[in-house]
Amino acid sequence: MASKVGFALFGMGNMGLLHARNTVLSPRASLNWIIRNRLEDAQKFVKDLNLNARCTTPDRLEEVYSDPEVHATLICSPSSTHNKIIQDSLHAGKAVFCEKPVTIAEDSTRKCYELAESRNLPLFCAFHRPFDPSFRNVYDRIKSGELGRVRLIKVTSRDLSLPPISYLKTSGGIIADSTVHDLNYVLWIAGSRPKTIYVQGMNFDPELASIPDMDQVLVTIKHENGTLSLIDNGRLAAYGYDQRLEVLCEEGLLSVGNRSSDHVTEAGHHVTREPRIHSHFTTRYDQAYSNELEHFLDVLEGKSELLVTKDDTIETMRLIRACKLSIETGSPVEFDEMS
């Protein structure tokens, strides 16, 4: 591997810009190409940061894939574009770092992983929660066994504000777009496959009924080892980006609270004020996003195995499908009965 891993970045939305920043900041990585439909946005980004990166559009990728200085693609473009970019990247000998989902269907996702295996290249689905230092600490302590058997996992995950309706119409629904991160995390921390899944939800914003979608869901999972998981996921929390975790064990409780946006508190005669919590995932999980890129670089350098595996990704996709079936039927779903 070269002294720096060269990346080609696809997409410049929230996640694209975030990963671009982390790539530029990492001493082990370089941003060599940016692929963007609106070429002028990419060119302005490169100019403003004085980067030594080239820009092109998605219909002109020959130079990107043939560039020997590009060792990996970083995919942050719309989900519908992932499958082709992944396959083209792997055929060109490039490793792949991909925002969720790998593809929009289980069958095509499996085929992408199979291609990666045949080419001996890593395909990383960027579920970021396991890379958050506090969440990782909880996982490590649970796996140590110091607090005994896990009884209950409770996850609260709420956005500050509802995304634009134009985005929600193409998001795949709250389960696939938002709850997916919590589903992946509880599978990881429970260390056990789901047995039954039950989802209840509500669209408090009437405009969501026409999509149709929900803006508040409760997901309950009974795992094969007896652990219970409860996920409370919402699109709207007026007080901030609410991210909390509790894990009840036989010998104690582990919990992760919200991170404050600053460290200033105010105490007066009649009131004590705490700072607001973070308002957006890009600031709340900034360290997690940086850590997952460094993990991917470790994998490329042969220092680590992928933390998020093919089986993890497929199992999470099957769980999304089970959640959607529970919503459709209004009943619990037996996971093993999912074809």
Image (cartoon, grey):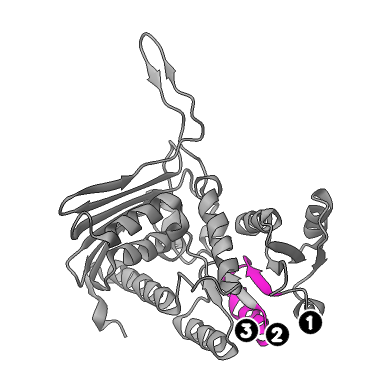
- Nearer the observer: mark 2 or 3; the answer is 2
- Between 192 and 321, the one lying in front of the other is 192
**Image quarter of the N terminus:** bottom right
Earlier-in-chain disc, 2 versus 3: 3
Mark 2: give few (<14), some (14-19) or many (20+) Cα within 10 Å: some
**Image quarter of the C terminus:** bottom left
Q: Which residue is labeled 1 in the image? A: 66
Residue 222, percent across and down? 21, 66
Q: Which residue is labeled 3 in the image? A: 87
Q: Which residue is labeled 2 in the image? A: 92
Q: CA distance from mark 2 to mark 1?
A: 7 Å
Asked if the stretch drawn in magenta spans residue 92, the answer is yes
Q: Residue type at mark 3?
A: Gln
At x 52%, y 62%, the residue is 169
Q: CA distance from mark 1 to mark 3?
A: 14 Å
Question: From the viewer's perspective, is 92 left or right of 124?
Answer: right
Question: From the viewer's perspective, is 325 left or right of 286?
Answer: left
At x 71%, y 56%, the residue is 24
* Span colored in magenta: 71-94
At x 36%, y 64%, the residue is 183
Asked if the stretch drawn in magenta spans residue 72, the answer is yes
Residue 175, percent across and down? 40, 63
At x 64%, y 55%, the residue is 22
Mark 1: give few (<14), some (14-19) or many (20+) Cα within 10 Å: few
Visible residue check, residue 334: yes
Earlier-in-chain disc, 1 versus 3: 1
Q: CA distance from mark 2 to mark 3?
A: 9 Å
State yes or no: discs 2 and 1 in contact (Cβ < 8 Å): yes
Q: Residue furthest top?
A: 269
Earlier-in-chain disc, 2 versus 1: 1
Task: Name the secondary structure under disc 1.
Answer: helix
Task: Name the secondary structure under disc 3.
Answer: helix
